[in-house]
């Protein structure tokens, strides 16, 4: 079989690991802004950015934002990206423009459950310990004695 030739004049940048790795990086490094949590802000931030010939992200602009710190967080994460530029025989230094949507959804907070009679742990037994001290000491070197009784009541 013949190998298929790539007829693209300029090859586009590729994120290492593909789209799945790209999403994992974005949402793995996303820190939801406190101001957005307080104002219960959710939505999608649309950003446009430039990838230089080395694969670094620069000139990040928010095309559509939701405010409350989410726009700045999207810009911060996109500037952390590093793209792969396929080696080209033409040695051209080309910049690429891309757009990305970053979805901000409020983190789910685990609600504290109130103790109800049904949710209380069941007790199978009750244990009482009674310690009786005998303080009668006849000689100075003799230790104080005590007696311990333990009662277990099974329900």
Image (cartoon, helix red, strand yellow):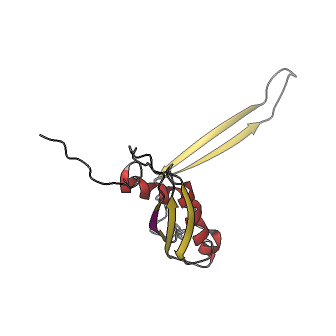
Number of residue marks: 0
Across and down, in percent, residue 69 comes to 62, 72
Find the magenta span and give its range: 97-101
**Depth check: 122 or 119 in front?**
119
Our reading of the magenta stretch's main secondary structure is: strand
> At 61% from the left edge and 79% from the top edge, which residue is drawn?
39
Q: Is residue 84 left or right of residue 58?
A: left
Q: Image quadrant of residue 72? A: bottom right
Q: Is residue 142 left or right of residue 42?
A: right
**Can the viewer see residue 72 in this picture?**
yes
**Depth check: 56 or 121 in front?**
56
> At 84% from the left edge and 25% from the top edge, which residue is drawn?
138
Q: Considering the image in quadrants, where does the N terminus appear?
A: top left
Q: Residue furthest front?
A: 90
Across and down, in percent, residue 17 comes to 38, 48
Q: Is residue 84 above or below residue 48?
A: above
**Can the viewer see residue 123 in this picture?**
no
> At 33% from the left edge and 54% from the top edge, which residue is drawn?
9
Q: Report if residue 100 lies within the magenta region.
A: yes
Q: Residue furthest right?
A: 140
Q: Considering the image in quadrants, where does the C terminus appear?
A: bottom left
Across and down, in percent, residue 38 comes to 63, 76
Q: Is residue 65 left or right of residue 21?
A: right
**Depth check: 108 or 73 in front?**
73
Across and down, in percent, residue 150 comes to 58, 42
């Amino acid at each position: 079989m013949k190998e298929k030739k790539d007829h693209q004049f300029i090859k586009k940048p590729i994120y290492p690991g593909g789209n799945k790795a790209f999403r994992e990086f974005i949402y793995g490094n996303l820190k939801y802004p406190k101001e957005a949590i307080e104002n219960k802000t959710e939505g999608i931030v649309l950003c446009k950015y430039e990838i230089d010939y080395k694969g670094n992200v620069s000139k990040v602009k928010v095309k559509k934002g939701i405010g409350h710190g989410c726009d700045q967080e999207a810009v911060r994460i996109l500037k952390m990206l590093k793209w792969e530029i396929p080696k080209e025989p033409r040695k051209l230094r080309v910049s690429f423009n891309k757009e990305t949507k970053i979805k901000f959804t409020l983190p789910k907070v685990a609600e504290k459950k109130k103790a109800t009679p049904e949710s209380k742990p069941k007790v199978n037994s009750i244990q009482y310990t009674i310690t009786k001290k005998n303080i009668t000491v006849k000689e100075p070197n003799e230790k104080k004695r005590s007696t311990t009784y333990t009662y277990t009541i099974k329900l």
